Amino acid sequence: MTYVQEVVSVLDRVLNLKGRSAHFTEDTPLLGHLPELDSMAVAAVLTALEERFGIIVEDDEIDGRTFATVGTLAEYVRSKVAA
């Protein structure tokens, strides 16, 4: 599975999208476009990504650009895993 696929899987599960994420691509916008992704959900997604990938997310690393699209979120995860 690619990082994009893994991130989409986490989003679907945490946000309870019930498979609506099946058509998500790297370019799918998230923050401000996905009603389920509010501030509490962002925290839950980050926690799930930490658990899934064995990474630690620092508060100062995250801003709106991280959650701009599926691709930007997947790239963030990829960079954390590589570090």
Image (tube, helix red, strand yellow):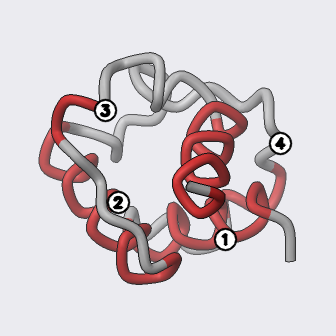
Q: Quadrant of residue 51?
A: bottom left
Q: Position of residue 52 (x, y in %)?
A: 48, 81
- Density class for disc 2 (Cα within 10 Å; few <14, some 14-19, many ≥20) is many
- Amino acid residing under circle 2: Val
- State the residue at coordinates (67%, 41%): 75
- Labels 4 and 3 touching (C-beta < 8 A): no
Mark 4 packing: few (<14 Cα in 10 Å), some, or many (20+)? some
Q: CA distance from mark 1 to mark 4?
A: 14 Å
Task: Report the label total.
Answer: 4
Quarter occupied by the N terminus: bottom right
- What is the distance, in whole Å, between disc 4 and disc 3 at their CAs? 23 Å
Question: In the rendered image, which residue does mark 4 sit on?
Answer: 25
- Please tell me the numbered disc located at residue 45: 2
Q: Residue at x 63, y 72 (%)?
A: 9
Q: What is the distance, in whole Å, between disc 1 and disc 2 at their CAs?
A: 16 Å
Dot 3 crowding, Cα within 10 Å, few <14, some 14–19, many 20+: few
Is tag 2's residue or tag 4's residue first in the polypeptide sequence? Answer: 4
Across and down, in percent, residue 60 comes to 20, 29
Q: Earlier in the sequence, mark 3 or mark 1?
A: 1
**Foreground mark, 3 or 1?**
3
Of the two numbered discs 4 and 3 in the rendering, the one whose residue sits closer to the viewer: 3
Q: Amino acid at mark 3?
A: Glu
The image shows residue 51, relative to residue 7, as above or below, that is below
Label 2 element class: helix
Where does label 1 land, which residue?
19
Name the side, left or right, on which 11 lies relative to 25: left
Q: Nearer the viewer, residue 8 or 54?
A: 54
- CA gap, disc 3 to disc 2? 15 Å
Q: Amino acid at mark 4?
A: Thr
> SS at mark 1?
loop
